[in-house]
Amino acid sequence: MSPRFASGLCLARSLIGAIRTGAILSGMILIGAIATCAESVAAPVQTEHVRVALISEKNALVPGQRAWLGLRLVHEPHWHTYWINPGDSGLPTKLAWHLPAYLQADEIAWPTPQRFDVGTLSNFGYSGKALLPVALEVAPTAKRGSIAHVSVDAKWLVCREQCIPGKATLKLSLPIAATAVTHSRWQHVFAAARAAQPLPSAWSGSARLAGDRIEVALSGADLPSTDQLDAFVVQRQVVGYERPRARRDGDSVTFDFARSEYFSAPPAALDLLIVDGGRAGEAARSVTVPFAGAEAGSPRH
Amino acid sequence: MKQFSIRVVVAALLLGAFAAPALAKVAVGEAAPDFTLTDSNGKPQSLSQYKGKTVVLEWNNPQCPFVAKHYSGNMQRQQADAVASGVVWLTINSAAPGKEGSMDGAAANAYVGKVAAKQTAYVLDPNGTAGHLYAARTTPHMYVIDPAGVVRYMGGIDSIPSTDKDDLPKATQYVRQALAELKDGKPVSVPTSQPYGCSVKYGS
């Protein structure tokens, strides 16, 4: 899709939005719309090995409603960026927002990452086309008819074998309106991002230290078969990052992780994503389990 | 010396055979495994030859942005201060030939000169022998070994994982801190931290 078409689309939508909301079509608004529309669709920045853009799911922000923005990452083949826990090396992508007072950005809603194993080293992240979605809370006091100027400083590390740090300041100008419609251009991108979100599971369980291993036992309905299971742990300095072994123990599934050499104290709880490689296309499940103290059941040294 | 070399070879074979589980060997409070390698000047370098001295091991890859961040001055200053107080500082390169950051002795010496590094020796580990023995994962990845040969610190060089030089003044320098505490006869207050950086470019 050409930038010209995108800009024209945006301008038309802004004008329609302005007419709908009963705003006076003054020269000021028109100029404002023209000046900002090229940005409001997205401003991709081509950096080394990854193209980044800040995109908005909808064409406007609605007072009192939640809106979704996202950092779109289009990686060159074989290059990847990182999840919140990057694994043995790497860095998670970071966003620092500059927003008007009536907007508040949540943390990144991290999509389920891929595993990248090279020899004995493991990493978690994203390749190809990825979107890091962020919810934007729009205060009810946001003024309709005005334009919200949103800016984010994004920092990432993109790696193949070598790694290159990147950063960009990305800006988006979005009208504040009574209603908002989904950008047709980004509809499938946000839909894919939703499909890539882990779903909260109803499983319960616990984690415990067992010598130089860490075991996480899960129970509940609908436990997956253990054939092609993988599990990613959010917290660092707890588990080793090689794929854990999974086994069926009666009514539960137990994941057997190596203990990280950098484990110093058990965290209060462990957040995991459970990925069933046997069910391609099915969302990962998230589960949070309490971590039993090192005393509970582990051999003493 | 020869005996140690054989031990390294045996260890390397075992590591090759058992892969990942054998990696988790080095631990704070336990004996640091010995190795014998060759430095950039062709001289043998083993851990055991420095018994009685505190030794810092630093994993290095000149082309890694995390390494470049610390070689903006932080690493050289720490090396100089450590060496001046009698500490042995070994910079180790475990990149396999052909991989990013792999260097021969001449190239390593050129790098050391260019960045004005102040380590005791720049050690070449093209087979990844010492790297696998220590389960070195990142560049940089740091280890502090006391005069009795016991690991006292392992992990990141500091507390802020980033490639950004601006973070240096805000970060706690864990290696510097551990060396100061050891010198004062105190326990190391932060004995492990999450190593951060580029992955070590081992051969397959």
Image: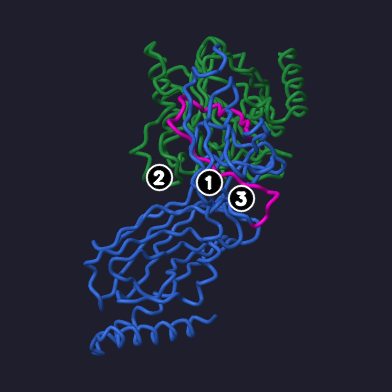
Chain colours: A blue, B green
Pinpoint the chain carrying mark 3. A
Q: Are marks 2 and 1 in contact (CB under 8 Å)?
A: no
Q: CA distance from mark 2 to mark 3?
A: 29 Å
As drawn, B78 above or below A185: above
Task: Tell me residue A276's x, y (percent).
Answer: 65, 47
Q: From the viewer's perspective, is the residue at label 2 or at label 1 nearer?
A: 1
Q: Residue at x 72, y 30 (%)?
A: B19
Q: Circle 3 sits on which residue?
A: A114
Residue type pointed to by label 2: Lys
Same chain letter for marks 3 and 1: yes
Secondary structure of the residue carrying numbered label 1: loop
Q: In the rendered structure, which segment of residues is drawn in magenta? A: A253-281
Residue denoted by label 1? A201
Q: Position of residue A13 (x, y in %)?
A: 39, 84
Mark 3 or mark 1: name the one nearer the start of the chain.
3
Q: Which one is in front, B57 or A204?
A: A204
Locate residue A20 relative to residue A135 in the image: left or right.
left
Report the residue marked by disc 2. B165
Q: Is residue A265 magenta?
A: yes
Residue density around tag 3, few if under 14, some if 14–19, many if 20 or more, within 10 Å: some
- Mark 3 lies on a secondary structure that is strand
In percent of width and height, residue A90 lies at 53, 44
Chain letter of the residue beneath label 1 in the structure image: A
Seen from the viewer's position, the closer of residues A159 and B175 is: A159
Name which residue type carries label 1.
Answer: Ser
Work out which quarter of the rendered image holds the C terminus of chain A and state it. top right
Q: CA distance from mark 3 to mark 1?
A: 19 Å
Using the numbered discs, state the Cα–Cα distance from disc 2 to disc 1 in whole angstroms: 41 Å
Q: Residue B38: tell me if it is visible.
A: no
